[in-house]
Image: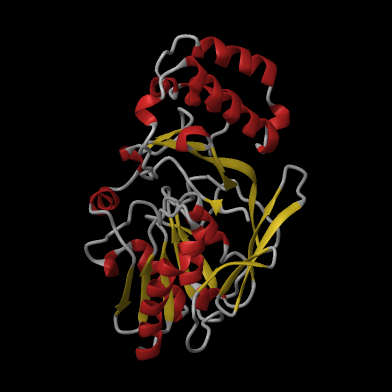
Amino acid sequence: MKKYLKIICLIFTTINLTAQNSISTKDSIATFYNKLVSTMKADYLYKEKVNWKQTELELNNNLQNYNDFKSSLNEITFLFDKTEANHCTVIFDDKAYKESSGGLKGSDLSEQWLNKYKKKPTFEVKVLENQYGYILMPNIDLLDSEKSNKIAQPMYNEIVKVKSSQNIKGWIIDLRFNTGGNCIPMILALYDFLGNNDIWETRNLNKKQISKVKLKNGKYLNNSKKISSIKPKGELMDKIKIAIIIGKATGSSGEVTALGFKGRENTLFIGEKTYGATTSNVRRDLPYGAIMALTIGFDCDRNGIFYDKLIPDIKITDEDNFDNLLLDGNIKEGIKFFVGK
């Protein structure tokens, strides 16, 4: 079963390796890169656009300069730049290797965002003005999708507590800190808002559907196969008004989570256009314990529509306020939506 991952440059996952100190020979370098290149030639989304003969010639010439395996991994950046693999990542020994461009600068983001990000924001559920639900859904680093339930169920339960005890008139789902990771626990935690529906799908270069994700009775199904699930409780909220806040750092699985709400009624997107990592990655294992996130398709909404970046219905710029959410311009706009102004 393919484990779909959404990994971008902000994510680093620790991998314990026992043999890394012994990896230093030319043979090890050749073994690793032969596998990496063959993996890309087999399944990379844009494989047909790459001049593999020239790329491999240049790569092999570069690799002749290395006698140490770990140092040679710097050439992953060359390979990804050459093939325009701007959403692929290789993770080895607590370090992520990716293409050289891209990424956000501190100047791209508000001071309020940067200050909260430094504190490593976690999942939050709050009630604002005793009538509006607020959910902060950050990035979730998880390589093993089969463990999604252990992360999703507690988050879902927190939402259920609020929906059961308060008369909520509308919900704000804040994805401004959702820089990527694994979308499965994110979407499962938000099951009550999405209901029993198709959520998103993956299509190839020819726009042919590769996979379709749907939710049914708390189950996350990919091509009808159960990937994970939560135990739902109470009535669904798939018709209630929702404001989705997106921003420049909303990327990869954060964008997929937002995509899940495209086509849902009573839904408003607020904020800024997203990062633009809206291609689908799958996990591939490489030699010596390395892991690759390989781009194999396009992330599309439930209607098969692809977005390079998600564009908000209402644009709000530089009005973040995480010290006082009621002064946050995005949240104020969401409340206007709930009260019909």
State whether residue 341 appears in this view.
Answer: no
Q: Report the quarter where the N terminus lies.
A: bottom right
Q: Residue at x 27, y 48 (%)?
A: 114
Quick one: quadrant of the C terminus?
bottom left
**With 3 as the anchor, is 45 left or right in this view?**
right
Image coordinates for residue 50, horizontal then vertical, percent: 68, 25
Report x, y in % for residue 315.
46, 56
**Residue drawn at (26%, 61%) of the image:** 322
In the image, what residue occupies the spot 30% across and 84% down? 130
In this view, 100 is above or below 341: above
On the image, which quarter does residue 100 sit in? top left
Q: Is residue 80 left or right of residue 304?
A: left
**Viewer-closest of 250 and 187:** 187
Q: Is residue 327 left or right of residue 315?
A: left
Q: Residue at x 68, y 38 (%)?
A: 43
Which residue occupies the foreground of this view, 127 or 140? Answer: 140
